Amino acid sequence: MANANLQPVLDRIDADFDNSLERLFALLRIKSISADPAFTGDCKAAADHLARDIATLGFTAEVRPTAGHPAIVAKANGGSGGRPHVLFYGHYDVQPVDPLNLWHRPPFEPAVTDHADGRKIIVARGAEDDKGQLMTFVEACRAWKSVTGSLPVDITIVIEGEEEVGSKNFVPFLESNKSDLKADFALVCDTSMWDQNTPAITTALRGLVYDEVKIKAANRDLHSGIFGGGAQNPIRVLTRILGGLHDDNGHITIPGFYDGVKDLPPEILAQWKNLNLTPESFLKPIGLSIPAGEKDRLLIEQVSSRPTCDINGIVGGYTGEGSKTVIAAEASAKISFRLVEGQDPEKIRKAFRDYVTSRLPGDCKAEFVDHSSAPAIALDWNMKPLAAAKQALTDEWGKEALLIGSGASIPIVADFKRTLGLDTVLVGFGLDDDNIHSPNEKYDLKSFHKGIRSWARILAAFAEAPK
Amino acid sequence: MANANLQPVLDRIDADFDNSLERLFALLRIKSISADPAFTGDCKAAADHLARDIATLGFTAEVRPTAGHPAIVAKANGGSGGRPHVLFYGHYDVQPVDPLNLWHRPPFEPAVTDHADGRKIIVARGAEDDKGQLMTFVEACRAWKSVTGSLPVDITIVIEGEEEVGSKNFVPFLESNKSDLKADFALVCDTSMWDQNTPAITTALRGLVYDEVKIKAANRDLHSGIFGGGAQNPIRVLTRILGGLHDDNGHITIPGFYDGVKDLPPEILAQWKNLNLTPESFLKPIGLSIPAGEKDRLLIEQVSSRPTCDINGIVGGYTGEGSKTVIAAEASAKISFRLVEGQDPEKIRKAFRDYVTSRLPGDCKAEFVDHSSAPAIALDWNMKPLAAAKQALTDEWGKEALLIGSGASIPIVADFKRTLGLDTVLVGFGLDDDNIHSPNEKYDLKSFHKGIRSWARILAAFAEAPK
């Protein structure tokens, strides 16, 4: 531990942890659901709240408008010019909470409870994604400021409010705030550890294409007794088309879908095999036992290095209680594809739409909505800050930090590279059982506590590492 | 016109028509949606309202409880014992009104408006099915009573409140009220004319099996980035299974589904060909042009004499605005089968469930809900009251009444035969463009007016026909 201030900072984090938790709870109580216009005011409230809090740490913090929910830009520069300068990114918006009846407690009334296996957990929508995660960084800054009166490196914090709905307005915001967001590299805290005891830095991320398709047939809902058998049923058409997206071996059948997809280098595949991600370890906690992806691939490939297709939602016809003998006029589905290096999101979107359109029977029309897209990311495993962060994580957790690929998409990483020219270090303390995007989202109390300590160490390490 | 009272009765119907319409409107204003428990009080109100109204026509009319919404039993007997005795059946309950935003006016605020082609129409939920239809009979009785002080035949009226949800409680009600419901034959007014100018009596009805399937996989909703590719997706499973229910030629693929289904006798098929039901006449009004059923069958066979399978509703995952990268824990669909003579509803239900279960991948469970079932009906084309009714309809409409098959199910017809030993005469004045079960349900003003006149004639004809 080269930095003499680090131990007092870590002690300060431990001593102040109850207050850190209370500050996280205050943020978790704000219903900042970005997808639903009914919560627009709550999104603004979350941004205001965070900017006020960050301003108390010596940052100039501003809430800035975007074409959607506002973003926060906060800057704390030593002024010397010689220190490393990091751009930290997080998002204050959260996913919708439905189905609400499956939550064990109200999603915006955070509490620390006991997990089934005895772990202490923080339960609330956003407890992990991304309020808990971003607050690990804010609280680490608070401890440094409190103990030393300053921060070990120059820091710009940018926090957006539309990550869960595709960041459509945040990318133009980056473009138009370029000069204010200069830094040496970016930090993102929105990823997971390898397991409860093993920290990880994510160096590869899958991309995403999210599309919606609506099939329309008759000009109105029909009675299935009068028209059944004679009139086209859009739910039948939709299930037939979507039901053919995978073959019996779990491969995606869209022509050209796998174009450009490369196999893992043998040495990486060998490393991954050693990680021993098994159905027992990965699927059993969610009540499953059989990998559902391509049958000729390892489970770890299925969830991190192979492209996928999931139907995220479907609706049509009568879905209330009881029965209704209706043939609906339309039916729709939301479909997303996780992409890997080599796949072009817009080519995949077009291939999907062509696939649907070419299978439409006469009398049916298809309409599409483009929700979002992002290419896959493969970071440079040799980028300089990575080694410093890896050592700091290893020191905190007492176990060597892994460099891993993630199945999820964090499109902002590509945007940072493209708009600001920045590489990103992805460090996060989530776990696979955090229920993000689901009822009963949680964040381990240990993740929150040691996450704060991890960032305190990482900032110290960056201060001493070569830029 | 043998009955000297008939012409004054018909004149009375014409003179009193505005009042008939107002009485129908009063019934249409009651939101008697049987499927939704929120409208239980409205169902009771509709029953009370109808019983009060029918009591003014010299009937002893009672609202009687069932295990669900109440039924009405009303009796008007001449006491002579020598007259024919008919049991008239209708239902006061209506279908749900969603999607509400597609209605051009509030569904429970009836009005007479102009159809696009100039026809006057009554618009409201239940305008046809079955409030408008049942009131044609009630108003015909009113005219007879008003002109002659009595009714031409003995009449028992039974009106139920759960037809749209499968009549589950009405069948036990029939059993336990058997002695009160004795009659020579039954009349049902819940069917359609052949076209706007051609009256029809329905002598064959398709049966129905309505089932709901829910596919469950993981023990909670999952993030598609973390688990996508590795975890089973119930929407993918559901679409794959349902998408295989039909082959490329429109045949249903469930093993044994067509067992016992007979082809039409050649002479009936020849008659039906002459009816010239074309895509132009039948599908164009609903915005379609291509028969969607079995490719080797006539359109008229597809919609009336062939069994079908329709998915009436489907839902799973995120269906709100925007996008959510979720893998749902479950997905469900409502599926109904129209059956024809020779098919056993419970065998079909079991075959469907076996079909689903046999296609379930590991890690998935299927749960089923039995909504209703009814066998197909083939009535005796030579039953005596048919000839009298056919002549009366022909007299009223100036065009020979047709004996037709219907694609829809009216399960009560089988229940009358089984519980009360009664054959049924099905006369109705609906049209294919009535939008029953859909937004903007309507009943032609002409159907309502000439429907009342038709029943007045039919009652007179029954009085003179051999029992």
Image: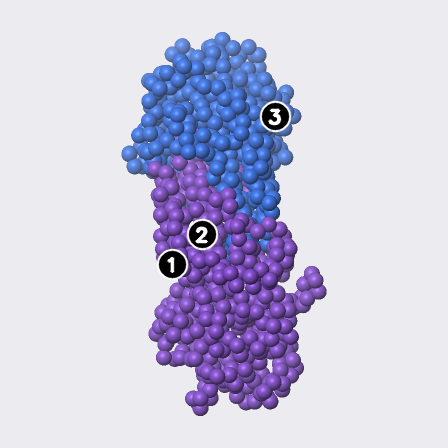
Chain colours: A purple, B blue
Q: Which labelled disc corresponds to residue A344? A: 1
| Place of residue A274 in the rendered image (x, y in percent of width and height, measured from the top left) | 60, 62
- Looking at the picture, which amino acid does disc 1 mark? Asp
Disc marking residue B66:
none
Pointer 3 chain: B
Tell me how far mark 1 sits from mark 2, CA to CA: 17 Å
Which tag is nearer the camera, tag 2 or tag 3? 2
Give left or right: position of A215 versus B255.
left
- The front one of A164 and B183 is A164
The kind of secondary structure element at disc 2 is strand
> Between marks 2 and 3, how big is the CA–CA gap?
49 Å
Q: Of discs 1 and 2, which sits in the foreground?
A: 1
Q: Mark 2 — on which chain does it sit?
A: A
Tell which circle, 1 or 2, labels the residue nearer the N-terminal end. Answer: 2
Q: CA distance from mark 1 to mark 3?
A: 65 Å
**Which residue is the site of mark 2?**
A335
User: Badge 1: few (under 14), some or many (20 or more) residues near its Cα, within 10 Å?
Assistant: many
Q: Mark 3 belongs to which amino acid?
A: Leu
Disc tally is: 3
